[in-house]
Amino acid sequence: MDKGYDSEKLHSFIREEIKANSVIPVKKRKRTRIIGECRQQLNENFDKKVYNRRNIVEAVFSVIKRKFGEIVKARKYYNQVKEIKVKMLVYNINKNVSVQHK
């Protein structure tokens, strides 16, 4: 996520509810003090290499949308998730087949 999602509430949710590491850069503001325990820890231990891998993920999403369309046709949420998973599965199969033929 980019700096637009930097909030203590979101960092706490990601860490406590999802049990994952948040890799969202802390916004630079006029005040020097960073408010929030999660935001302070992230600011001290921010890994720019991990954050820059975000570009790879964004590129893959872009390819999937271009190849298979960005519209999800299913109406129910459960089926929408299935449709997206199928698109990702087909993308991975397509990529592996094309690598093996080289």
Image (spheres, rainbow, N blue to C red):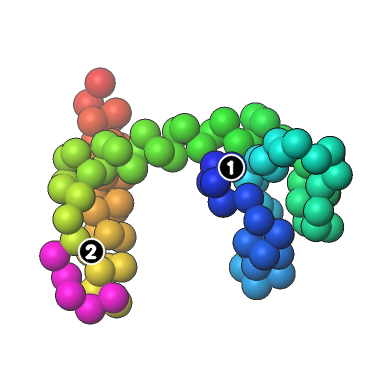
Counting from the top left corner in percent of width and height, residue 32 is at: 84, 38
Q: Nearer the viewer, residue 71 or 96?
A: 71
Residue at image mark 2? 83
Report which quarter residue 65 is drawn in. top left
Figure check: 100 above or below 67? above
Report the residue at 29% width, 38% height from top.
Answer: 62
Side (left or right) of 98 relative to 26: left
Residue 76 included in the magenta stretch of the image: yes
Q: Which residues are magenta?
A: 73-77
Report which quarter residue 3 is drawn in. top right
Q: Secondary structure at mark 1?
A: helix
Q: Are marks 1 and 2 in contact (CB under 8 Å)?
A: no
**How many neighbours does mark 2 have within 10 angstroms: few (below 14), some (14-19), or many (20 or more)?**
some
Counting from the top left corner in percent of width and height, residue 96 is at: 30, 37
Whether residue 15 appears in this view of the structure is no
Q: Nearer the viewer, residue 92 or 55?
A: 55
Q: Main secondary structure of the magenta part?
A: loop
Figure check: 82 above or below 45? below
Residue at image mark 1? 3
Counting from the top left corner in percent of width and height, residue 46 is at: 74, 38
**How far, Cα to Cα, is label 1 from label 2?**
30 Å
**How many neighbours does mark 1 have within 10 angstroms: few (below 14), some (14-19), or many (20 or more)?**
few
Which label is found at residue 79? none
Side (left or right) of 45 relative to 57: right
Counting from the top left corner in percent of width and height, residue 81 is at: 31, 68
Report the residue at 19% width, 61% height from top.
Answer: 72
Q: Nearer the viewer, residue 89 or 71?
A: 71
Q: What kind of residue is marked 2?
A: Glu
Q: Nearer the viewer, residue 33 or 78?
A: 33
